Amino acid sequence: MLGSLQQRDNSYITNSESPAYQRYQELARVAGVSRAFTLSVKLGLYTLLQNVKDTEGLPGLTSQQVAQRLGLQQAASPVAAAAAAAAAAAAAAAAAAAAAAAAAAAAILVTTEPPAGLPGLSSQQVAQRLGLQTAAGFRGVSDWLDVLVSLDNLLRSGKGPDAVYSNSADAQRYLCKQRPEYMGGHAVLYHDRTFPQLLFMEQSLKTGVQPEAARSIVAPVMDTFAGAAETQGSASGGDPVAFALGMTGCNKPAFQALAVQFDWSRYKTLGDFGGSAGVLCCCVAAAQPHMACATYDLPAVHGAAEQYVQQQGLTDRVKVLDVDFFDDSPFPKHDVITMGMILHDWGLQKKKLLLRKAFAGLPPGGAFIAVEVLIDDGRRDNLWGLVMSLDMLLELEGENSFDYSFEEFTSWALEVGFSSTQLIRLTGPNSAAVAYK
């Protein structure tokens, strides 16, 4: 079926009455507004505006057949083959779908009652302060700002040259860098890393690795944590602090939910491995005063974690420690061991290795918790998780990295020796997969 589609012309796409064309238009619009949104966060538009106010059974193909017919990388393992099938089936709309996911990840709630009587900036003032084009007759800046109005990121009073723009209440809360709830770092990650790498998705699907041209634009993510890249201040250039801040905005709501939804009453100590800026530990320490926490990661992000823990006023409750969780040393002992967005970084064998090390570091009755964008067991509903699995292909070439379902997690956990598992729904597409020893 997929092979025959390649032979057809695209005349059906030009028929404005066809569902295919309408869907194409919808995806194109999503891709466009996603880039407008991430650029606005990257340029600090919302922070700028903050300064002026306070506020089944059908025939088909196997994954191996898909790979063969489309000339894609043919996976050796069933898990990798399934990932290749999902990637191939989504290839026609992959870039747009990823853009949609990027917008969804950084999306803010639509405000129903905008703040009244607060000043803002004209498009000309925005252009001047952000170093954008100010030539007479140039409409690009106002078009961009109006896209953000349509996304409910900005408010506008008036129109044309006299229009004044200000933050919506939710943009004011979640997209201004000085706010404790700031989530814009994740959008910056998509601007700096994911969107450029999507240009090379075809090559990744065919060869399993990114071409050299991609790595000249975006530094390999492991070089970021190894401190190999020299460019600072940008996640694309390899700044580990910028990367850590991006992950903070992405995961903090899920970590806050975990801190209150999981039953911590039986436990006293927590070790978060791959803790980045220490956000998960800080969320648990703030919500559970009896818990003593330690966040572990590579030395490259130690400073970012210390700074974040200090900002939260939790230096007496959260320790920042360096670790390489793939070295030969065992994990330090803790009642609960967590990994937030870590297991999906690796292939199956390394996933199981980390599970075994966590199991060994827990007492009887202890718990291992993986916070992830878990794919639904049927691999149909959690679009964000499926797209993120493609992101892992782009970011961690050669590792056979993939996102996974709770069903898969349970099978690995039981194989390692855990006695039972539990699924906890957190925020948005995020869940916690818990394994009890």
Image: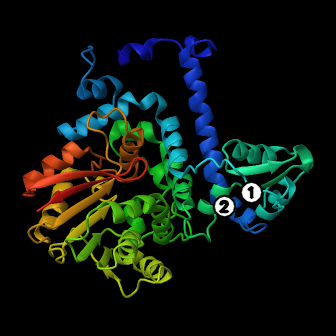
| Residue corresponding to mark 1 | 115
Which one is nearer the viewer's eye here, 219 or 112? 112
Quarter holding residue 326:
bottom left
**Which residue ends up furthest to the bottom in the rendered image?**
316
| Residue 243 in view in this figure | yes
Question: Quick one: SS at disc 2?
Answer: helix
The C terminus: image quadrant: bottom left
Cβ–Cβ under 8 Å for marks 2 and 1: yes
**For the image shown, how many numbered marks are present on the structure?**
2
Indicate the position of residue 111 as horizontal and vertical percent values.
Answer: 65, 49
Question: Which of the two discs, 2 and 1, sits closer to the camera?
Answer: 1
The numbered mark, 2 or 1, whose residue comes first in the sequence reads: 1
| Residue corresponding to mark 2 | 172
Sort mark 2 into few (<14), some (14-19) or many (20+) by Cα contacts within 10 Å. Answer: many
Indicate the position of residue 138 as horizontal and vertical percent values.
Answer: 86, 45
Residue at left 52%, top 12%? 9
Quarter holding residue 331:
bottom left
Answer above or below: position of 414 versus 66: below
Question: Quick one: SS at disc 1?
Answer: loop
Residue at left 47%, top 77%? 308
Kind of residue indicated by mark 1:
Pro
Indicate the position of residue 338 as horizontal and vertical percent values.
Answer: 27, 65
